[in-house]
């Protein structure tokens, strides 16, 4: 089966392409690096020729409110149009658990717009909402700095390994479209401030983490369970402890982009 992975050079995309190929699929990694740009449409017709499935694990280079909205709206519209023309039978997209509870954030308004375009299109689809990646825990400090301290809300979250995200996305991509939303999460819950504090200490990063009930998450107010998936979520196997023994945990953040904000 030919499966085009939009954002195939990214954190999740590169793992997904490898896993799909290991399972014998023709997985094509598509991104500006390989001449495919969903914002302009460049290279899309050629990449989608003969594809059964398109998986969108791209992300906007800028998380500024207007830029991120333009990215997800334009790229999703283009993708769905080119998929219809190419006869693609399944559109899979990666979104974030709690998106509809985080709409004070420009990033999450853009993810919501992406989801709504997919639901309104004629292409059968599966939307996968994941919790935060372990690889992103240090990034949570980076986007939460007030002066020289990271201010984080002491609420629950249930992060997961990027490798488990890629496995779950791959499994859904090769199945029938669910025409709905599937939640995935990690095997354990933590308080955000505690895990970020622990991660920074392990990285010998001297920044202090303050548990601040008024701190925003990516610009949105959060409460105890805003970021936690529902009871039907499919859970990854990798615990934070196990992930720490893996090479991925030695990299401070998989794709360090200090200007970015949390997703
Ligand atoms: N971070 C989290 O904790 C979290 C949690 C749940 C869900 N998510 C979602 O997971 C998804 C993937 O995140 P990630 O961290 O794997 O992303 P990432 O590592 O930042 O990779 C982004 C990818 O998007 C591609 N891209 C950028 N502009 C593009 C364009 N115009 N056309 C086509 N491709 C383009 C990039 O290609 P180049 O390399 O060629 O620039 C890259 O392959 C996002 O949609 C995010 O909302 C994230």
Image: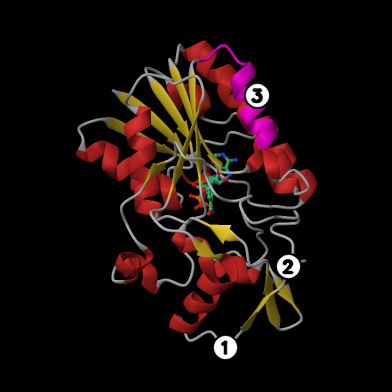
- Residue matched to label 3: 117
Identify the mark nearer the N-term, 1 or 2. Answer: 1
- Residue matched to label 1: 206
Residue 194 screen position, x and y as percent: 54, 73
Please give the label number shown on residue 213: 2
Helix, strand or loop at label 1? It is: loop
Q: Relative to residue 47, is residue 103 depicted above or below?
A: below
Separation (CA) of disc 3 from disc 1:
43 Å
Residue 212 screen position, x and y as percent: 72, 72
Q: Relative to residue 191, is residue 48 depicted above or below?
A: above
Question: Could you tell me which residue is drawn at 44 percent across and 20 percent down?
Answer: 90
Is label 2 within 8 A of ligand 1 (CB to nearest ligand atom)?
no
Question: Could you tell me which residue is drawn at 58 percent across and 33 percent down?
Answer: 38
Q: Relative to residue 255, is residue 208 depicted above or below?
A: below
Judging depth in this view, the residue of 239 and 202 nearest the camera is 239
Considering the image in quadrants, where does the N terminus appear? top left
For residue 51, say whether it is visible: no
Mark 1 Cα shell of 10 Å, populated few (<14), some (14-19), many (≥20):
few
| Most frequent secondary structure within the magenta stretch | helix
Question: Could you tell me which residue is drawn at 61 percent across and 71 percent down?
Answer: 141
The range drawn in magenta is 112-123
Task: Please say whether residue 182 is one of the residues in the magenta stretch.
Answer: no
Identify the mark nearer the N-term, 3 or 1. Answer: 3
Q: In this figure, what is the number of numbered marks?
A: 3
Q: Is residue 257 left or right of residue 31?
A: right
Q: Relative to residue 129, is residue 261 depicted above or below?
A: below
Helix, strand or loop at label 3? It is: helix
């Amino acid at each position: 089966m030919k499966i085009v992975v939009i954002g195939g050079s990214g954190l999740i995309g590169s793992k997904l392409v490898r896993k799909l190929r290991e399972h014998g699929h023709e997985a094509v990694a598509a991104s500006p690096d390989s001449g495919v740009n969903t914002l302009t449409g460049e290279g899309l017709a050629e990449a989608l020729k003969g594809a059964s499935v398109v998986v969108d694990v791209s992300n906007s280079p800028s998380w500024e409110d207007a830029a991120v909205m333009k990215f997800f709206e334009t790229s999703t519209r283009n993708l769905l149009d080119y998929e219809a023309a190419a006869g693609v039978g399944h559109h899979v997209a990666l979104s974030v658990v709690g998106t509809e509870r985080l709409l004070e954030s420009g990033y999450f308004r853009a993810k919501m717009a992406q989801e709504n375009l997919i639901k309104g299109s004629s292409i059968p689809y599966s939307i996968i909402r994941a919790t935060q990646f372990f690889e992103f825990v240090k990034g949570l400090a980076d986007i939460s700095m007030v002066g020289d301290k990271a201010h984080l809300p002491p609420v629950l979250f249930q992060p997961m390994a990027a490798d488990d995200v890629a496995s779950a996305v791959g499994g859904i991509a090769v199945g029938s479209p669910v025409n709905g939303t599937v939640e995935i999460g990690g095997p354990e819950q933590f308080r955000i401030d505690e895990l970020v504090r622990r991660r920074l200490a392990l990285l010998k990063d001297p920044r202090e983490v303050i548990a601040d009930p008024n701190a925003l998450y990516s610009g949105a107010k959060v409460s105890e369970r805003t970021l936690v998936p529902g009871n039907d979520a499919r859970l990854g196997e990798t615990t934070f402890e196990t992930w720490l023994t893996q090479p991925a945990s030695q990299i401070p953040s998989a794709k360090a982009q200090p200007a970015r904000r949390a997703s």
